[in-house]
Structures are given as structure tokens and as C-alpha cells.
């Protein structure tokens, strides 16, 4: 069969088809277009920027370091001490006490009724700074003087000019001055009723009660040396036993023994009472 003759396009038909084909077919890329690549959109980071994180960590470290340093201050830097206020103590004057030990001490054996007792006797005359012929002692007598030998007497029994405004014008004993530290002895057997270092005006003070010739008699020893008290209350003593040492305690105006004899509670003159009783 003869092939159909090609149709001859009518005017305007080809132009519309070409336009439709141009719209439906992909655009033709040139070399210049191929070289150009579309710019990719920036990706959103999953984490915060590392630089910002690093600065945060540095800032945190900078904050922590001072804190650590402050926490360690007590170990590295000495703290400023608080002011200390001194408390002034009240001072109470205290008189020094002393005791002089003799170079030689002798003992005597005394017989009293059915018993024998050894008594430590005061030392001999070598320890006396002053002696006098005011009296004579008998070491074998049951009643003796408070010193083994005669000693000076600075004030006798009775009325006198008071040595101080608060002193009595009546002197109830003898002031005997053999020298400070001289040993003092009990005048007879007896019992200690008072023995104290706080005797007020009497200072270091002892009172011994005796029974002599059927009569209660008291002998008193005052102003003795601090620390020399040799007896205690209630103690039984023997004639010649050490009582203490001459001192200057209490209301005293020089080292001496204030010695008293009391009968029936009344003071008597020792210079008048003792000589008649100091006998073998």
C-alpha cells in the first residue's frame, strides 16, 4: 500500500506543542550550571559549641580554685590570734618559813613512876646567842625554865609603858631574848591544849597544861619562829621536850619568847613562881 503522505502541520499547532514540550522536559544544564553547586544549609549542632563549653569549664575551675584555696586557709595561713587580756592576780604577802637544825642534838632518859621515856632535849649553850645570870636551870628537875641556861629578859611581868598604841600596858609574862632560832623546852610534863601558827598577836603559839604540886598550871609560849612548831594539840609532852624556836611572829618587835605561867586561869610572875619549883 502506498505510505500515507505526511500531514502538513497547520499554522500555530507546532508552536503550542513546542511550548508544552519545553514545560514538561527537564531544563538543559550548561557547563557553567554544572560547575555551580547549590550551597548546603548549615547543620544544627547536636551540642553547644565546644569553645563555649571550654570557657564555661574554665570559668567553673576559676571559681572552684578560690573556694578550695579559702577552704585550705587554716592549713596554709596562720590565723590572726584573738587578743588575750591578762588577769591580774591578787597577791597575798606570805612570810617565809624556815627551820634551823642544830649541829648536835642530845637526848636524855627520864624516869617517871613505872615508865621510862627518852626525850629529845634542846641543844646546849653553843646555840644561844645571848645568856645571862637571870636564872639558873636544873636539867634534873621535874620543873624547869624554858631554856637550859639563863638568858636576857627584855621585859618583865607587870605594868609597863605600852610598846605600841594597840598594846596593853600590863605585861602578862616575860620577854626572853636568847637570840632568834634558840630552842625552847617544855617546863614540865603535860598535855598540849593549843598549838598553832595562826595565834593572832601571839603568832606561833603553844599552851601546855600541867599538874604541879596538885595544882593545874598552864605554860604559854608565844612569838615562836614560823615552821618551828614541834607539838600538836592533845600531844603528851615531857619536861625538856622541844616546843619550838625563838622567833618574831605575831605582834612582835624583835625576836624573843613571850613566856607566861597561869594558875587558876590567872597570869602570875614567872620570875617569882618558877625558882621555888626548879629543884632536883
Image: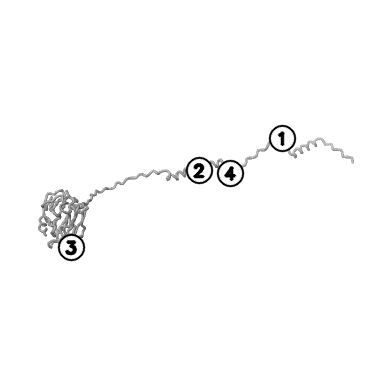
The residue furthest top is: 32
Q: Earlier in the sequence, mark 2 or mark 4?
A: 4
124 or 174, nearer to the observer:
124
Quarter of the image for residue 43 reads top right
Q: Secondary structure at mark 2?
A: helix
Mark 1 = which residue?
31
Residues at circles 2 and 4 in contact by the CB criterion of under 8 Å: no
Q: Earlier in the sequence, mark 1 or mark 3?
A: 1
Mark 3 = which residue?
116
Mark 4 and mark 3: Cα distance apart in space? 116 Å
Q: Nearer the viewer, mark 2 or mark 1?
A: 2
The numbered disc on residue 265 is none
Q: Nearer the viewer, mark 1 or mark 3?
A: 3
- Does residue 55 sit above or below 119 in this rendering? above
Mark 1 and mark 3: Cα distance apart in space? 154 Å
Mark 2 and mark 3: Cα distance apart in space? 99 Å
Q: x, y percentage for residue 92?
A: 25, 49
Q: Earlier in the sequence, mark 1 or mark 4?
A: 1
The numbered disc on residue 61 is 2
Amino acid at each position: 500500500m502506498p505510505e500515507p503522505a505526511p500531514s502538513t502541520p497547520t499554522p500555530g499547532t507546532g508552536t503550542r506543542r513546542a511550548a508544552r514540550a519545553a514545560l514538561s522536559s527537564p531544563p538543559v544544564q550548561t557547563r557553567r550550571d554544572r560547575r555551580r553547586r547549590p550551597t548546603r544549609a548549615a547543620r544544627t549542632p547536636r551540642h553547644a559549641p565546644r569553645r563555649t563549653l571550654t570557657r564555661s569549664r574554665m570559668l567553673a575551675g576559676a571559681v572552684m580554685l578560690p573556694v578550695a584555696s579559702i577552704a585550705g586557709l587554716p592549713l596554709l595561713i596562720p590565723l590572726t590570734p584573738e587578743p588575750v587580756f591578762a588577769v591580774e592576780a591578787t597577791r597575798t604577802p606570805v612570810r617565809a618559813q624556815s627551820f634551823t637544825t642544830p649541829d648536835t642534838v642530845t637526848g636524855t632518859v627520864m624516869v617517871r613512876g613505872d615508865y621510862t621515856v627518852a626525850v629529845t632535849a634542846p641543844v646546849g649553850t653553843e646555840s644561844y646567842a645571848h645568856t645571862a645570870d637571870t636564872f639558873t636551870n636544873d636539867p634534873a628537875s621535874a620543873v624547869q625554865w624554858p631554856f637550859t641556861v639563863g638568858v636576857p629578859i627584855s621585859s618583865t611581868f607587870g605594868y609597863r609603858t605600852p610598846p605600841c598604841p594597840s598594846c596593853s600596858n600590863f605585861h602578862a609574862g616575860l620577854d626572853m631574848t636568847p637570840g632568834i632560832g634558840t630552842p625552847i623546852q617544855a617546863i614540865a610534863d603535860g598535855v598540849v591544849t593549843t598549838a598553832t601558827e595562826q595565834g593572832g598577836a601571839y603568832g606561833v603559839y603553844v599552851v601546855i597544861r600541867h599538874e604541879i604540886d596538885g595544882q593545874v598550871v598552864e605554860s604559854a609560849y608565844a612569838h615562836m619562829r614560823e615552821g618551828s612548831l614541834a607539838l600538836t594539840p592533845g600531844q603528851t609532852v615531857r619536861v625538856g621536850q622541844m616546843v619550838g624556836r625563838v622567833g618574831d611572829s605575831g605582834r612582835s618587835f624583835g625576836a624573843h619568847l613571850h613566856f607566861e605561867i597561869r594558875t587558876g586561869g590567872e597570869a602570875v610572875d614567872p620570875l617569882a613562881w618558877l625558882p621555888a619549883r626548879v629543884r632536883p
